[in-house]
Image (cartoon, rainbow, N blue to C red):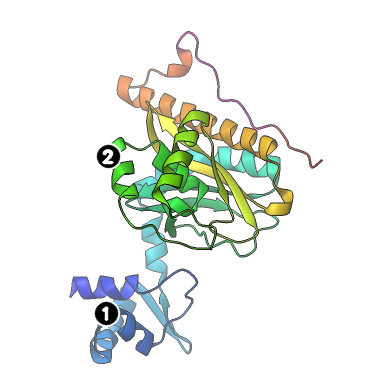
Amino acid sequence: MLEKCVRILQAFRSGDQHLRLADLAQRTGMPKSTVHRLAAVLIDQRLLDQDDDGYQLGIALFELSSLVPVEHQLRLAALPFLQDLFMATHETVHLGVREGLDVVYVEKIHGHSDLGLPSRVGGRLPLNCTGIGKALLAFSSDEVRADFLSRPMRRITDKSTTDAARLTRELSEVRATGLAFEREEATIGRECVAAPVLVQGEVVAAMSISVPVSAYRMPHLAAAVKTSALGLSRYLRNAEEVRRTGGRSASREPGYRAAPRVVEIRSR
């Protein structure tokens, strides 16, 4: 029963507001009678809701999602840096982590030109089609990269990178520069630049700025996102040091430098 209930919840996809009983039955492969019975259980637990338009995800899922450790801890640590980045650019900024072959977006601050972007908090996109995904993949282990590159790659737009040799070259450049680029690979008319968040040499997340092609000012945006990612990396490293040493902050160590602030970027 639990597995069938999960299948009903996972039938909802990005952009779905409501699903009819027939939609849920089709996506889950279960009879309508079974879906109707299990949906009633989920409604009782506030995991689903129902109105005249059909079924929608319930408020209890939202409440639970805020308790997920990666969401709660990483998001809280990253928010000041993401807010600085947004204030510096007024464009859409993202924070994401790797989950299998996908980016899962932990946070998103909508920019003034955020139209048509497929990203959403809690949503997934393929690693090869996003700046964040490329940043995460480039700094993942050799085994993770080799496994990903050996699989068929999904395509979102006609410009999505799906060739293993080409992506291998891109990832090598990302490791050399600390910057990942996505050019209309997730949304036509949008480009983005991303940077990894590294703690003790391991990539824990990545952040990005997404802008319309007409507003793409690479040197300025690259400097801003790299500075923010570096600031978050230092903050997380210091927090890990405090945890490891039982309260002794790395900020008291000789040579420690506070995380830099993002400077304002003005349109030219």
* Cα distance between the residues tagged 1 and 2: 42 Å
The spot of residue 214 in percent (x, y) is 73, 52
Tally of numbered tags:
2
Task: Give the vertical position of 80 relative to 3 (above or below).
Answer: above
Given the image, on which type of amino acid does mark 1 rest? Val
Q: State the image quarter where residue 24 is shown.
A: bottom left
Which residue has dot 2 on it?
143
Residue 133 against residue 239 in the figure, above or below: below
Part of the protein shown in magenta: 253-262
Q: Residues within 10 Å of mark 1 (few under 14, many from 20)?
A: some
Which of the two residues, 140 or 105, is positioned nearer the viewer here?
Answer: 140
Please tell me whether mark 2 sits on a helix, a strand or a loop.
Answer: helix
Q: Main secondary structure of the magenta part?
A: loop
* Drawn side of residue 105 relative to residue 100, left or right: right
* Badge 2 density bin: few <14, some 14–19, many ≥20, Cα 10 Å: few
Q: Secondary structure at mark 1?
A: helix
Residue at left offset 37%, top offset 23%: 242
Residue furthest to the front: 165
Q: What residue would you read off at disc 1?
A: 41
Q: Measured from the top left, where is residue 121 in percent x and y?
A: 48, 57
Q: Residue at x 31, y 54 (%)?
A: 151
Task: From this view, report whether residue 57 is shown above or below residue 239.
Answer: below
Question: Where 110 sits versus 139, above or below?
Answer: below
As for residue 194 lying within the magenta part, the answer is: no
Q: Between disc 1 and disc 2, whose residue precedes?
A: 1
Give the label, 1 or 2, closer to the camera. Answer: 2
Q: Residue at x 35, y 53 (%)?
A: 101
Query: Residue 258 colored magenta?
Result: yes
- Where is the C terminus found, in terms of image quarters? top right
Front-most of residues 220 and 86? 220
Q: Amino acid at mark 2?
A: Glu
